[in-house]
Image (spheres, rainbow, N blue to C red):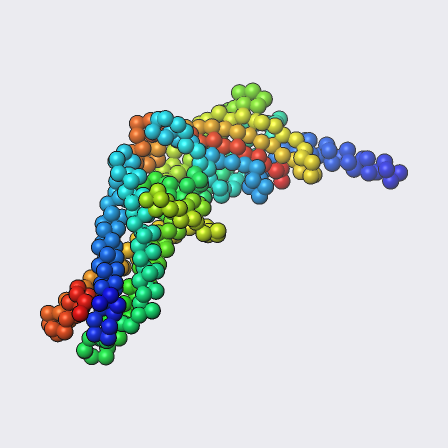
Amino acid sequence: MLKNSSTSYGWISIVIHWVMALAIFFLFGLGLYMVELSYYDAWYKGSLELHKSLGLLLLLFLIIRIGWRFSNITPAELPGPRWEQLSAQLMHLGLYAIMLMLLLSGYLISTADGRAIAVFELVNVPALPWSFDNQEDISGEIHEILAWLLMAMAAVHALAATKHQFINKDKGLKRMLKSD
Amino acid sequence: MKNLLLAGALTAATLVSTTSNAADYKIDVEGAHAFINFKIKHLGYSWLNGRFNTFDGTFSYDANKPDASQVEVLIQTNSLDSNHAERDKHLKGKDFLNVSKFPTAKFTSTRYDVKDANNGVLTGTLELHGVTKTISFPIEKIGEGDDPWGGYRAGFSGTTALTLADYGITYNLGPQSTQVELELYIEGIRQ
């Protein structure tokens, strides 16, 4: 099934979930790596170009994903105490919010001087018509903090899914791997 | 009689202003008639230019007593602008100016050695990136006189080269890019 049902995620949700997960972990590693490169490293410029291009593609994915989430049903909650269900909902909401802010803060760094971001040298994403003082510095700090926060949240999210799969045995992980 | 009095008063005022020892100027940052620019070689192939947008300062100068000249300039380091946000972020970060730790740079003159009517060598202390060093560099007076709006102005320029490592900035930009040239264009309004 492509669409979600009341018991299972559809393939569209599953593919978007894992593509984004892979891209986010890759971007996190790339981000940590590229800021340590020296000026004379051959990848000094290319790593940043790749980071920005992938980041903006990810933003596109996130927008599609949020649209899909609201135009589609979500499978029923996994059985468990109410507080666990609530925290799961809160975590999912938080992941969306942090991903969005993380991506936007990155965009605000590179566009702080009005420059567009060239996505793989194919599409230019323009800067906003306004900016604020020290935008690149403030956005940069936020970007770094949110990146670490997202990693921590993703870890908790993955642990929770694993716990559902192997301790509660309610297919918590499997339902995001295969559609019914 | 009234005219005579007025003329007398004007003459007196002129006398007072020409014989006055106090010639204190405030740098015209309001009207942005002062610039603190820097340039550094890019890979040894070209010059990269940038500037500090926010600074303030005062100087005193009297053409009759140039030896007594003095200047003080305070630069807000986070106002660095090289017309590229990603580069500015890098230059303001820990690899270079570390502006969150060292938000200001300060130059305070200690002496001025006159060479001729419009030239001299300015010596003073520069505090940059938490390091204070004494530097000397040539200064040229561009001109001074009344402005069209009722004020009196004087302007100077000066250039000096700083070795970045002297100020604890050791990020490797290549062998041709170890020094930065500072260009100062200062216009002051007499107070």
**Residue B70 in view in this figure:** no
Query: Where does the image place residue A170, in percent across and percent down from the top left?
Result: 14, 74
Q: Quadrant of residue B27?
A: top right
- In the depicted view, which residue is nearer to us: A159 or B28? A159
| Horizontal side, residue A44 vs residue A78: left or right | right
The residue sitting at 42% across, 50% down in the picture is: A135
**Residue A119 in view in this figure:** yes
Task: Work out whether B74 lies above or below A18.
Answer: above
| Horizontal side, residue A65 vs residue A173: left or right | right
| Horizontal side, residue A76 vs residue A121: left or right | left
Which residue, as the protein is rendered here, is positioned at the far top? B116
Which residue, as the protein is rendered here, is positioned at the far right? B1
Which residue, as the protein is rendered here, is positioned at the far bottom? A82
- In the depicted view, which residue is nearer to us: B160 or A159? A159
| Horizontal side, residue A135 vs residue A70: left or right | right
The residue sitting at 52% across, 42% down in the picture is: B56
The residue sitting at 53% across, 29% down in the picture is: B157
Which residue, as the protein is rendered here, is positioned at the far front? A1
Query: Where does the image place residue B132, in percent across and percent down from the top left?
Result: 38, 36
Query: Where does the image place residue B14, in percent across and percent down from the top left?
Result: 73, 33
Q: Quadrant of residue A68?
A: bottom left
Task: Work out whether B116 lies above or below B102.
Answer: above
- In the depicted view, which residue is nearer to us: A147 or B155? A147
- In the depicted view, which residue is nearer to us: B13 or A136? A136
Query: Where does the image place residue B161, in percent across and percent down from the top left?
Result: 41, 28
